[in-house]
Image: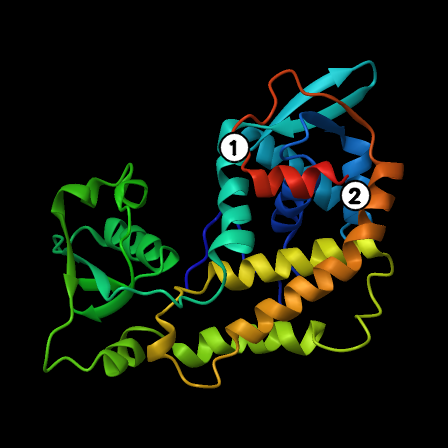
Amino acid sequence: MTQDPTFPEADGGGVPRPQALLLTFFGGYVLGRHVHVATASVLDVLGRVGVSEDATRSTLSRMARSGLLHRVRRGRSVYLGLTPRSREILLDGEARIWRIGAVNTHWDGTWTLLGFSLPESWKRQRHVLRSRLLWSGFGALQGGLWVAPSPVDVGPLLDGLEAADHVKVFQARALPPTDVGELVRDAWDLPSIAGRYHRFLDRWDGAALPVEPADSLARQLLLQSEWLQTIRQDPRLPQEHLPQDWPAERAQRVFRSVHARLDPEARAIAADMLDTIPDEGGDEDAPAEAQEHASAG
């Protein structure tokens, strides 16, 4: 599945890239706390996960330029806070992790159908549209017809696209002789989706946690970054049309169990090491779940 540029793909070793780790950090320790955090503290945190200072600094600069971070100078120190755009991204992540979940157990049978027909010369527009469709959980049904297993707000998906005027969107239900199980197998790469969950389980499902990184804050940051990248690439297909041994539910239980095991010590480490200043704006839009997780720090 094509990756949202906000959450770049993991590197060849499966470790999330610096921007994904940074967004996870800001979601866990800044969102909902009404603070900016010192750049030096952020460098320390990412260093614990094995990210070099140069890589962290360049990623922070890029995120600030793209409107994901707000910088404030106090004396010789620079402090980093959230922007409306980054809050929106992080709130979406919180919802996916703590409210929506990895398994679609309450599907009502509604599909979103999206069709488009673009001129042959519009190769770039076609590529961008297909990438956004994949990122939004759509599967290619046939030709220019795409399908998603739930109602989808396509407004953000089409925002800024020249191709938007060539798109038609419907909500529908499958009728005989449609075989929904076959439709799911044809439109989505189930082995690839399942493989991401299995890789997560291989790393985190055991009595002993990975040896590296060494402390609970770094481990929790890596755990949550890996989990969020895993579920962001899952279209949450209806449970009744997935293989019986589908690994998403088991992986979700493992994530939540390990997260709870690491959380007390991770919060204690963060409380000791993070240098923060009050945020003049605050995170008024943070949901109860986000504020609960953040306030523990």
Q: Earlier in the sequence, mark 1 or mark 2?
A: 2
Depth check: 281 or 297 in front?
Answer: 297
Q: Residue at x 79, y 70 (%)?
A: 210
Which of the 4 image quarters holds residue 198? Answer: bottom right
Asked if residue 255 lies left or right of residue 220, the reply is left
Asked if residue 140 lies left or right of residue 290, the reply is left
**Label 2: which residue?**
53
Q: Residue 70: x and y, percent?
A: 61, 25
Asked if residue 200 lies left or right of residue 238, the reply is right
Q: Secondary structure at mark 2?
A: helix
Q: CA distance from mark 1 to mark 2?
A: 20 Å
Q: Residue at x 48, y 48 (%)?
A: 5
Depth check: 275 or 125 in front?
Answer: 275
Q: Is residue 278 visible?
A: yes
| Type of colouring | rainbow
Instruction: Spot the residue most to the bottom.
Output: 244
Check whether the beta carbons of the residues at disc 1 and disc 2 lie within 8 A of each other. Answer: no
Q: Residue 132: x and y, percent?
A: 34, 52
**Identity of the amino acid at label 2?**
Glu
**Label 1: which residue?**
66
Question: Can you say which quadrant of the picture contains the N terminus?
Answer: bottom left
On screen, 3 above or below 294? below
Question: Can you say which quadrant of the picture contains the C terminus?
Answer: top right
Which of the 4 image quarters holds residue 155? Answer: top left
Instruction: Spot the residue most to the right.
Output: 272
